[in-house]
Amino acid sequence: MSAEIRLHLSDAEATERLAVALAPLLRAGDTLLLDGPIGAGKTHFARSLIQWRLAEAGLSEDVPSPTFTLVQTYDDGQVEIWHADLYRLSDPLEVVELGLDEAMQSAIALIEWPDRLGDMAPADACRLRFAHDGEGRSVVIDWSDSRADLWRRSFEEEAATA
Amino acid sequence: MTRTLTVLGIETSCDDTAAAVVRSDRTILASNVADQTALHAAFGGVVPEIAARAHTEKLDHAVEAALAASGHALKDLDAIAVTAGPGLIGGVLSGVMLAKGLSAASGVPLVGVNHLAGHALTPRLTDDLAFPYLVLLASGGHCQFLIAHGADRFERLGGTIDDAPGEAFDKTARLLGLPQPGGPSVEAEAAKGDPARFDFPRPLLNRPGCDMSFSGLKTAVLRERDKIVSDKGGLTRQDRSDLAAGFQAAVADVLAEKARRAISAYLDHAPEAPAIAVAGGVAANRTIRAALDRVAADGGLRFVAPPLQLCTDNAAMIAWAGIEALRDGYDTSEPVVARPRWPLDRSQAPMLGSGKKGAKA
């Protein structure tokens, strides 16, 4: 069940569709590790996902880049969502200082530059590796969870009607 | 005339730890910012102050030093103004906790200040601007056009829908192998380059309104860089300078064109003494400053750019915003609560991350 899923994302809207297809499937304790170079769509993915969950709850808030503040937190009424950019961290201990270790247990955690987690990345986390791919992007999803298939189907259905 | 107020300001909302003492006659008696430059990594960004206790330790000294330099004892002050948000929660909390402790121990009342209001009100501290004036707040984490109607009344005309320009400078520096922070290093590199060699996109330039987008620009820089690398096997110094210059020109063009529209919306309010001010670290960029100065002159507006140390994060602006709040009848019996997100204009729908399609709500 831990087969990797490889997808091509032709434009920013495709990245958004992928995020929106996953958004309703997430629950407390889910951690998404968003890997990839600058400009590969990590923040766009996270922002789209957060925006969808907030909108579903009838909420609407700014979703700024977490690059400067390291962490932005949201509450969609059911669960807290943590959006983190760990690029500026220099020591995995700072992850604890930020409270991210607890958030990975109790919230939905979207983590950019997750290599900074060291060995603190949860074993059952969903890893997305974004890359530049021609004019678009590609993503490789590695998630040993039965929801991975649902997510893929939902994305492909959306893509077919887009 | 109302009596003179003397206020201690405390700012810890992001990477800096700062304290200042300011008087309501616009005199800055003391202002210090704990120096972060020693902590700047050679590559990859400014090391953030994550540990709340480290902030607190530095802040103790910063407050002590500011009070000593001002010649005032804490108990003689009229208020303590502290940044209550928006920002990095650990930093904001440590500032608020320290301020609460100082207030409880000394009996000096406490004022919770919005960090963005501190930036937006700085032109009144430095240049005594009259309301309403237009302000472009552009920094690492923020980018918005605001009309300041009063010390607690801001109208947001538009802002970035994704990254702030300061972040775009930092990420462009990373892409070009230039040191952090990216603002000064990209500017220095751009000075040696040809801004016309690369035709970088000006996102949302032709869309009505004052919204901006800078996220796509870093991708455009990346693509041009990679194209050169794959054609020639590497970047020459000139290539790098030209990329930096092209990037900077695109940011300046977008800010100038959106400023033109913001000015037009602002002039509808028929201000008596029309003025536009810039605040935030991006105001330090000379190309951007010059572009805004031209647009202001075209619109018949006075252009105000506070000195750099008052454009970047500092505590004098927090003390000043506290003074403005007190003059407006701020209720110091209200408890001050740390708020990691705190929009200045609560009447406007959020736009950050609302994307092209817009949020459902």
Image (tube, coloured by chain):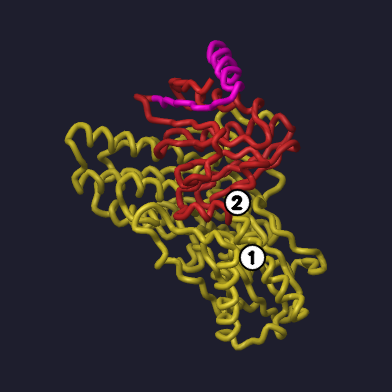
Chain colours: A red, B yellow
Task: For residue B5, say whether it is visible.
Answer: yes
Q: Which residues are magenta?
A: A136-162
Name the chain letter of the residue that bears numbered label 1: B
Q: Secondary structure at mark 2?
A: strand
- Kindly identify the residue that appears in the image at 61 percent across and 59 percent down: B90
Quadrant of the frame with the N terminus of chain B: bottom right
Judge whether A91 appears above or below A25 on screen.
Answer: below
Q: Circle 1 is placed at which residue position?
A: B94
Co-location on one chain, circles 1 and 2: yes
Say if B210 sits above or below B269 in the image: above
Q: Residue, x 40% and y 68% (percent of image)?
A: B38
The secondary element bearing badge 1 is classed as helix
User: In the displayed structure, does residue B257 sit left or right of residue B242?
Assistant: right
Quadrant in the rendering for residue B348: top right
Q: Is residue B78 left or right of residue B160?
A: right
Residue B37 in the image: state x and y as whole percent.
41, 66
**Residue B272 appearing in the image:** no
Read off the chain for label 2.
B
Q: Residues within 10 Å of mark 1 (few under 14, many from 20)?
A: many
Q: Is residue B74 magenta?
A: no
Q: Residue at x 52, y 41 (%)?
A: A121
Q: Quadrant of residue B208?
A: top right
Q: Gap in Å between the C-alphas at discs 1 and 2?
A: 29 Å
Residue type marked 2: Leu
User: Disc 2 marks which residue?
Assistant: B146
Look at label 1 and name its amino acid. Answer: Ser
**Nearer the observer, B60 or B182:** B60
Q: Where residue B267 sits: x, y (%)?
A: 59, 50
Could you say where residue A90 lies in the image, as x and y percent from the top left? 44, 55
10 Å neighbourhood of mark 2: few (<14), some, or many (≥20)? many
Of the image marks 1 and 2, the number of the one nearer the N terminus: 1
